[in-house]
Amino acid sequence: MKLGKFRFGGIHPNDSKNSAEISSSKLSNPPKTVLISMAQHLGAPANLLKNKGDEVKRGELIGEANGFISGNVSSSFSGKVASIDIAPPPLGRGANAVLINVDVSDGLPEYLEVPNYMSLSSEEILGKIFKAGVVGMGGATFPTNVKVSGASKSNCDTLIINGVECEPYITSDYRLMLEYTEELFKGIEIIRKAIPSIKRTVVGIENNKPIAIQEMSKIASQYNVEVMPLRLQYPQGAEKMLIDATTGRVVPVSKLPSDVGVIVVNIATLYAIYEAVAKDKPLIERLVTVSGDAIKEEKNVWVPLGTPLSHIVEECGGINAENVLVLSGGPMMGASVPNLDQAVNKGVNSLLFLDKDKMAKDVEHPCIKCGRCGSVCPLKLDPTGIAHASKALLPAEKLHSLDIMTCFECGCCSYICPSKIPLAQWIRFGKDSLRRYS
């Protein structure tokens, strides 16, 4: 079988998916407190609805979407508001957050599938997705109701389900495909009801997940869905790359997938859509891969939003190294987490704990102008040129002329650079400078 792939650039890092065979599980004990940020999504932080001393119930709305690009926030536990704090970045983006003392006696009410949910209109489906606070859970955290509504208005004809999970270590989407297969296809039906113009549905899965390909293929024909195996090629899970690999369509610079008739939905987001519409369940927990050589027990665990990282470490047997790098996300695009007081939010699909003493001690050397960074850039950019312009604090016009904002910081350039220049970090620095001073 010919494997799909995007046509330019990419790299092949070791996938390190040691947690792939570990079935998902719940926390054995609830945390004593949860810190729930009002900025768990792209766009404006939600308006805080609670005050210190207020009682809250599990699933209750505690943050109301503030504008078109924003999202609702619900409580993951019942309890009492202990304080209103500022959730620190990177996981809280410096926004208001509710610290809740968890009431373990209240129990965890089960959300059951409601009858006749497929009889809902497109508008009603979008309303439920909005009410539940569903956002893109592959890392982008863009409000899902806005994305689906835009695809419907654009008459998109192709729905792509992103089961690629190309970042090393991460296996949470893989476990969802194995353990919640039927629910994912019900989620596809829900999206297609909301976007009547959809004619083709493709599930893209990289070929290092043969069991997921097999399990998803077993019932795909019942739902008129195509499962497409893809060649291992990071960053295949990026929207533009996946669209290229599965449809051959190219999304132009500064354009959106809807401009070429496509909507891409991540596996975890798809499951959240199913729960929101079929179970009236707000997005209050998510499956997280906990992995790395510095954590004693690797797991795929359902984590209530707002759970402190310290509690997750306890659940996984503790840390077995003295000098540890903690990443939210994968090693290619993840963000460094400064301490374990921070809390899981909607965009955290993985927590990596890496022993710094075992990591390669790279020494940066001058650029040898080999051109490898450009050869692996999937967007055909000039990473070295952009990085040098950023480092030299060149004018905004120069950075824009190099299409710096097109870069989605996949890290291919840094990975391949023989001189060990942190190109992606310098590009990120340049983009941050533009945002601050523009």
Image: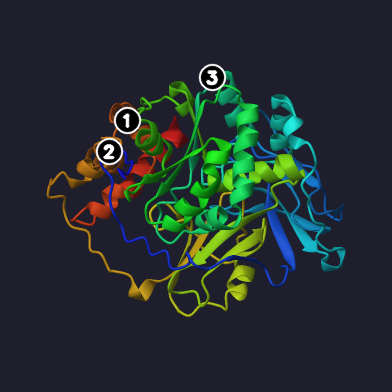
Q: In which quarter of the image is residue 81?
A: bottom right
Q: 207 or 217, which is in the foreground? A: 217
Where residue 323 sits in the image (x, y, percent)? 43, 75
Q: Where is residue 150 in the image (x, y as percent from the top left)?
A: 57, 24
Decide: few, some or many residues near mark 2? Use Cα within 10 Å; few <14, some 14-19, many ≥20.
Answer: many
Q: Which amino acid does label 1 sit on?
A: Asp
Quadrant of the snapshot with the N terminus: top left
Q: The residue tagged with tag 1: helix, strand or loop?
A: loop
Q: Mark 2 points at which residue?
A: 386
What label sits on residue 403 in the rendered view? 1
Assign a secondary structure to mark 2: helix
Q: Mark 3 points at which residue?
A: 154
Residue occupying image coordinates x 58% and y 72%: 313
Looking at the rendered image, the disc whose residue lies closer to the viewer, 1 or 3, is: 3
Evaluate if marks 1 and 2 touch, with contact meaning CB atoms under 8 Å apart: yes
- How packed mark 1 is, by other alpha carbons closer than 10 Å (few <14, some 14-19, many 20 or more), is some
Q: How far apart are marks 2 and 3 (CA)?
A: 33 Å
